[in-house]
Amino acid sequence: MKNPEATFDCIVIGAGISGLALGFFARHNGRSVVVLEAGPVAGGKIRTQWEEGFCCEWGPQGFLDNVPETLELVRLLGLQGRLVQASNAAADRFILRNGKLRAIPLSPLKFFVSDVLSWAGRLRVLAEPFMPRANEEDESVLAFARRRIGKEAADVLVDAMVTGVFAGRAEELSLAATFPKMAHMERTYGSLTRAMFALRRKGGGGPAGPGGTLTTFQSGMQELTDALACSLGTALRLNTRVRGIQYRQGPPSNWVVHLEQGETLLGRHLVVTVPPREAANLLKDYLPPLVLADLQQIPVPPVVVVMTAYRQSQPFAFPLSGFGFLVPSREPRQILGTLFCHSIFPNQAPPGTVLLRTILGGARQPEVIHFDDHELLRLVRRELHAILGGDPDPCLVRVFRHPEGIPQYTLGHPQRLQALDQALAALPGLHLTGNGYRGVAVNACIAEAKKVAMLLA
Ligand SMILES: Cc1cc2nc3c(=O)[nH]c(=O)nc-3n(C[C@H](O)[C@H](O)[C@H](O)COP(=O)(O)OP(=O)(O)OC[C@H]3O[C@@H](n4cnc5c(N)ncnc54)[C@H](O)[C@@H]3O)c2cc1C
């Protein structure tokens, strides 16, 4: 006799942080849930590997401790005592400018005496409050920054910030989709400077978002996804790829999910958290062709992480105390930046050693995904030699490849989301979330997952 079909309030596809958090919040709200993950492990981009006392993060290094949904999740999982904040030394950040690392000034006064920009560039930043507001609905991050703070500051500082967050090109990304708070500040206060002073008086943060401290867990980021997986128990099914999806108007359920193993599951709600291209593939029979094309066109260029460790406290000429450095695209270099992991989180490397995490790829250099490990190491050593001075032999090298790295919210992204929302409104119980839509940071994935979980009545 055929097995009866299992029925759930909610079927979640994908067990990265988005799918895991969604499953967790939905169960917390009393819903019956199953989370389906194609791979053998949960966590998606989040994975931590400890080797010879060094903490090697495949994906995110941490999250900012200023988003209530993440802090709530941490509290509900009982992980507050496991949090580790970045050290004070990590406040010092560097940027490559004309081949030389320069400290990013931490206060307006320090900014005006620093050499991070020319005198003319610094004076142009001062003129920001007098620049007119935009008329355009969607503007690139670079165009916005050039208009407000001048070409030099935009090409150096804002370009580097976009590299740090999205591994992207500032001229291609939509301001409204990537830094909505900045667009809002200009609309509301007429100037970023005035907005910053007003928000500071209210206790808010800077133009890129509220301030916060980079935070991880004692055993690294995987501690979070392991705790979520553990809490989901048998509601999480690994090695379970979805073969097909069918809509069947309820009751009792709207969605029929066919698994590769031949099993069929029924759900009142279906939440798809996989990357946009895969989501389009799964939903090809239900979403309108234009929306499917939009999803397929959200670029997700590859990112490569090369970890190198050294059993010396000062392996390079440049002192490795601080957060790390970013490389603006105008610099003729082939890496996006390097984090000083031993300095950010001293528990992530044995005392007296150095652990570096160099990021390559993204929209600027997608081709690096095809380099083999030897080529990548050669490239990283050459670049670190040129930037930090010295070519010490690393005692440990690990390469992590993300063929689909960080989604790029290019110009038109807000309009694409609008069309997607309209299409979803016609399909009761279907939800799309994950890093492809409304924020790539771990915090954004968790906050969006909670929002969707609240809709699963
Ligand atoms: C190198 C790197 C560094 C980063 N650093 C930071 C950082 O420091 N701080 C920060 O906040 N963010 C960082 N990010 C971004 C952040 O890590 C990601 O945006 C976030 O983890 C994505 O989570 P997700 O669940 O949306 O997607 P994913 O992690 O991609 O998860 C999707 C899951 O779906 C599964 N799947 C796919 N297809 C199917 C299918 N058909 N059936 C079932 N399952 C399927 C996949 O196997 C995967 O497990 C970084 C990202 C990268 C790549």
Image: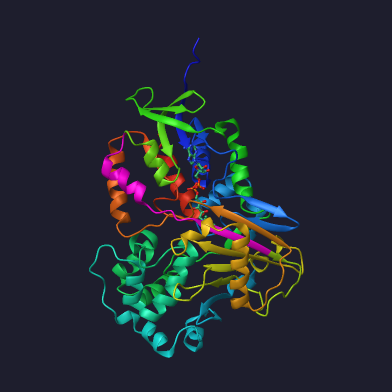
Magenta highlight on residue 166: no
Query: Is the residue 155 above or below the residue 86 in the image?
Result: below
Rendered location of residue 383, percent (x, y): 58, 72
Toward the viewer: 419 or 186?
A: 419
Q: How many marks?
A: 0
Q: Residue at x 59, y 57 (%)?
A: 372
Rendered location of residue 414, percent (x, y): 31, 55
- Return the residue found at the far top: 1
The quadrant of the image that shows the C terminus is top left
Rendered location of residue 442, percent (x, y): 51, 53
Q: How is the image coloured?
A: rainbow
Q: Residue at x 62, y 44 (%)?
A: 226
Rendered location of residue 227, percent (x, y): 62, 43
- Return the residue found at the far left: 135
Horizontal side, residue 438 vs residue 228: left or right: left
Query: Is the residue 200 above or below the residue 46 in the image?
Result: below
Query: Is the residue 86 above or below the residue 7 in the image?
Result: below
Horizontal side, residue 406 vs residue 373: left or right: left
Toward the viewer: 79 or 203?
A: 79
* Residue 64 in view, yes or no: no
Q: Residue at x 55, y 32 (%)?
A: 235
Which portion, as a residue range, is magenta? Answer: 286-308
Q: Residue at x 43, y 48 (%)?
A: 448
Query: Is the residue 292 above or below the residue 367 in the image?
Result: above
Horizontal side, residue 96 vs residue 297: left or right: right
Horizontal side, residue 257 vs residue 378: left or right: left
* Residue 40 in view, yes or no: yes
